[in-house]
Image (cartoon, helix red, strand yellow):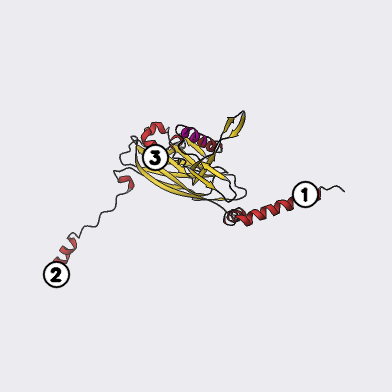
Amino acid sequence: MTAALAFAAALAAAPGPPSPPLPPSPAASTTPVISAALTDTNVQVKSDFRGARIVLYGAVFDAAARPSDVVILVRGPEQPVRLTRKQRVAGLWLNSRPVVFRGAPGFYRAASNRPLGDIANFGVLRRLGAGVDHLTINAPEEQRTETRYGVRDVVVSRLGSDYFVWRRAVVRLKEKAGLYHEDDEGVRFVDRGLFRAEIALPTGAPTGVYRADILLFQNGVAVSRRIRTLTVEKVGLERALYVWAHERPWSYGLAAMAFAMLAGWAASAAFRRD
């Protein structure tokens, strides 16, 4: 009995197999990591929509506590942009042939904790499309489209140096509409490693899926990245009219024309003098 008890005690005291190590936490990792989230990932556009403000918050995990910068790039769905400009021909001011860019983001926001030029060099910013000056806008291509009614839309290519003039016009118009914006103080560190930023959506923000790139920079290099998405969609009566106009344009056009005629007749009847 004494031998059995001694064997049991020795077995209990013997070390067991080693337990698997716990995965390292982001804070304990030697590689800097950025994490972020949006307070709202779905914006509903109704008749009383007056814009929206979405808060993006996040944290930087770096065991070495190296100096860091955060850049947030929000890009909306791409849309073709058609531009013309006035030119003098034989003493008359006429519209030039249109220039159509195949795709430009319908919405763009660049936010950072300090000026982008102080965070990274020109090449890095251009490669990432960080900032309005480095924003990728698809160049125009040459095509000639003819409808059944003979109306032609000419897309001019090979603009040469004029390309930058037209590109600046696209950016200027978008900025005037509040759709393009760059904020060097749009990201604010509220505590050590914790930051927040606001994404302001104007009333004219296009519907669709938006992409937010959250970049962590150290020594001018993007060392970590997170991508979040945001959906802006019409709801209610606006959504029904939008779907009707895009899926059944002929019936929508006829209904709109009939409504306009009815409204005109009603107005004339109301104010008719005997």
Name the residue beneath numbered marker 2: 4
Determine which quarter of the picture holds residue 161. Answer: top left
Residue 264 is at least partly visible in this image:
yes
Element class at badge 2: helix
Contact between labelled residues 2 and 1, with CB atoms less than 8 Å apart: no
Q: Amino acid at mark 2?
A: Ala
Nearest the camera: 51 or 141?
141
Q: CA distance from mark 1 to mark 2?
A: 108 Å
Q: Amino acid at mark 1?
A: Ala
Q: Nearer the viewer, mark 3 or mark 2?
A: 3
Q: Is residue 167 magenta?
A: yes
Residue 128 is labelled as 3
Name the residue beneath numbered marker 1: 267
Q: Position of residue 47 (x, y in %)?
A: 62, 49
Q: Amino acid at mark 3?
A: Leu
Residue 40 is at least partly visible in this image:
no
Q: Position of residue 2 (x, y in %)?
A: 13, 69
Element class at badge 3: helix
